Image: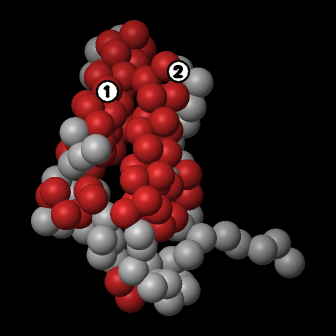
């Protein structure tokens, strides 16, 4: 039988640990910035919560995004209100124009998410 892996952060079904330290939060934020920088540079990919250091630290079913700097800034969970939800995910759904235009739109959305995260430092 093939094992099915849910496409969510690996800690999703676990209880959250004690409150995260500012150093842990900063390290996760810097890791997320590095992820988006690699996407902008064309060397990285987005796998949602699976390769998001902030999600790995803060995304739990019983405590969704509590303490995450993105949630603190937007007032919403699951990155709603950030460039990720508003532009990046939307750019996957809408394909208008040439392949080059689509790629440019994706890079611009990734750059906006990168800038948003840098603004949280």
Horizontal relation, residue 72 to residue 5: left or right: left
Horizontal relation, residue 88 to residue 47: left or right: left
Question: Local crowd at mark 1 within 10 Å, few (<14), some, or many (≥20)?
Answer: many
Residue under the point 23% across and 63% down: 71
Residue under the point 16% across and 57% down: 73
Residue 9 x/y as whole percent: 53, 67
Q: Is residue 59 above or below residue 28?
A: below
**Residue labelled with disc 1:** 111
Residue under the point 55% across and 36% down: 45
Q: Quadrant of the N terminus?
A: bottom right
* 37 vs 110, nearest the viewer: 37
Q: Report whether residue 110 is seen.
A: yes
Q: Quadrant of residue 50?
A: bottom right
Residue 97 x/y as whole percent: 29, 15
Q: Secondary structure at mark 2?
A: loop
Q: Report whether residue 102 is seen.
A: no
Q: Earlier in the sequence, mark 2 or mark 1?
A: 2
Residue 3 x/y as whole percent: 78, 74
Q: Is residue 1 above or below residue 56?
A: below
Q: Is residue 26 above or below residue 56?
A: above
Horizontal relation, residue 116 to residue 107: left or right: left
**Residue labelled with disc 2:** 42
The colour scheme is secondary structure
Q: Secondary structure at mark 1?
A: helix
């Amino acid at each position: 039988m093939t094992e099915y892996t849910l496409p969510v952060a690996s800690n999703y079904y676990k209880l959250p640990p004690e409150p995260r330290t500012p150093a842990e939060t900063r390290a996760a934020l810097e890791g997320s910035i590095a992820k988006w920088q690699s996407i902008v540079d064309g060397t990285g990919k987005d796998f949602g919560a699976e390769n998001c250091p902030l999600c790995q630290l803060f995304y739990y079913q019983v405590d969704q995004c509590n303490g995450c700097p993105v949630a603190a800034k937007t007032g919403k969970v699951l990155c709603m209100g950030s460039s990720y939800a508003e532009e990046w995910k939307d750019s996957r759904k809408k394909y208008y124009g040439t392949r080059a235009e689509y790629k440019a739109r994706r890079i611009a959305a990734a750059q906006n998410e990168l800038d948003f995260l840098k603004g949280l430092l």
